[in-house]
Amino acid sequence: MLQLYDSLSREKRLFVPGDPARVTMYVCGPTVYNHAHIGNFRAAVVFDLLFRLLRRRFGEGAVVYARNFTDIDDKIIKASKETGAPIAEITTKYARIYDEELSAFNCLAPTAKPAATGHIAEMIALTERLVAQGFAYAAKGHALFSVGKFADYGRLSGADADERLAGARVEIAPYKENAADFVLWKPSKADEPGWESPWGRGRPGWHLECSAMIEKVLGETIDIHGGGQDLKFPHHENEIAQSACAHSGAPLARYWLHNGFLNMGADKMSKSLGNVALPRDLLKKHHGETLRFALLSAQYRQPLEWTDDLIEQSKKQLDRFYRLLAEAAPDGEADIPESVVLPLEDDMNTPEAIAGLHELRDIAMQMEGEPKRRAAARLKAAGALMGFFASAPEAWFKWTPPSDGAALTAEAIEAMLAERTAARKAKDFKTSDRIRDALAAEGVIIEDGQSGATWRRV
Ligand code: AMP
Ligand code: ZN
């Protein structure tokens, strides 16, 4: 029984898809003009977890998850002007980096990754429909959505009209019939990228992109629409208005999910405040799975403060799990225990689920032999549902940060270990102790077992 908190109805609801054989989810993706920050990744990781839960419940082939790339946008045009690099070069580069970094966080690839520039015809067609039906109007090379024509406008964000106008600093422009009206299509200057349209050469507005791609890739009414809570207004409010009006009032999504912010101290992490930590830099020091664990340590709707201590605690916890997995060599396929599934299916209560993982570990610790291996297999399966324990334990403990040029390479450690083994065989304990100390000074621990010496980093 999967329950999700729906931001539109403002309550936790049993999740019932329109068609259990084709469960659809859309998450607003990045504008690809520079590096994402770890706050952006919170949304991606949270919805990756939901993707995994849906696949478990409805079948891997039954879930269609689309996450877009916004690859036409004023910020991209600006980046291109500033750097001299063509737009396509910038967007291709940052989309690739985004995907690579997310896979380091053990995120599964979405089923579809539509790009805005691949759907311009659909965006024009949708706008034409809205204009033809009187929900939108053309003015001075623009097409604008007439907010007053959609009675439900504001239901998701809940703010009243004045608050919205003030809060979002909605642009007041002479061509607008009403200050709250928003742009579907806008004109491009000669040196800006543009496409021919019934309103002249121009480009789409951001909100229109998502509505058009959702319709094309997933359908008129999708099961789940997700994003960070800052997208409720105006972005999601506008998506709802466009799609509902273009589809005779059919709702855009059955469930709206919004993740809370990742904060730095008292502030939301954001590019405009300049208080960002980038996965690009973090991945030079930390394993992606550690960062994933940190992002999932709070329930997704709660704020989460990003600190060095959070990363360190996450690493410590993962080390404890991996130590058990190394010790017990999980045996066979296992069902995922309810102590982990139930909290996850209760609106993704990840802190409870992680507590469940610790319980499973404690249980396995008390066992020996085959029962221990089976208990470890249950722990492994439960962790896998959350995207954890993707490494072999040995690889986990031997992992070196890619940027850490000073750290000994695995090859160098193996060579020193071989030297130490030879010294011990020759009963040259002075040399073998010296090598052990030298490795310890580099943060490498040697453990002598029955089948010889092994090593791990601390
Ligand atoms: P943007 O690049 O600002 O459009 O953001 C991309 C995604 O990241 C959106 O879903 C945002 O809501 C989300 N996001 C941005 N900043 C944060 C933050 N500090 N914490 C959580 N999510 C965020
Ligand atoms: Zn969107």
Image (spheres, helix red, strand yellow):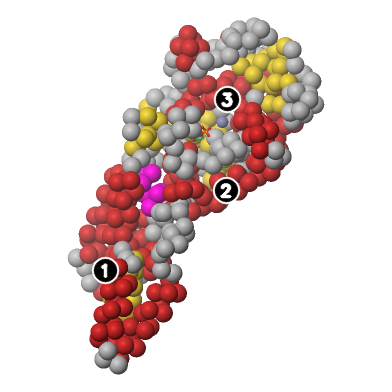
**Type of amino acid at the residue the image marks with label 3:** Glu
Q: Is residue 332 visible?
A: no
Residue range in magenta is 289-296
Whether residue 294 is in magenta: the answer is yes
Q: Main secondary structure of the magenta part?
A: helix
Question: Mark 1 against mark 3, which lies toward the viewer?
Answer: 3
Alpha-carbon distance for marks 2 and 1?
40 Å
Q: Residue at x 29, y 70 (%)?
A: 440
Q: Which mark is residue 239?
A: 3
Q: Does label 1 or label 3 sit earlier along the sequence?
A: 3
272 up-or-down from 146: above or below: below
Look at the numbered disc 2 and give the secondary structure of its residue: helix
Alpha-carbon distance for marks 3 and 2?
27 Å
The quarter of the picture where residue 344 lies is top left
Alpha-carbon distance for marks 1 and 3?
51 Å
**Type of amino acid at the residue the image marks with label 1:** Lys
Give residue 455's position: percent from left, percent from top: 34, 73
Quadrant for ligand 2 reads top right
Kindly identify which residue carries mark 2: 97
Q: Name the residue furthest bottom.
A: 426
Q: Name the residue furthest left.
A: 366
Q: Using the image as rendered, state which of residue 343 and residue 449 is in the foreground.
A: 449
Q: Is residue 65 visible?
A: yes
Kindly identify which residue carries mark 1: 372
Give residue 108's position: percent from left, percent from top: 51, 51
Determine whether label 3 and label 2 are within 8 Å by CB: no
Question: Mark 2 against mark 1, which lies toward the viewer?
Answer: 2
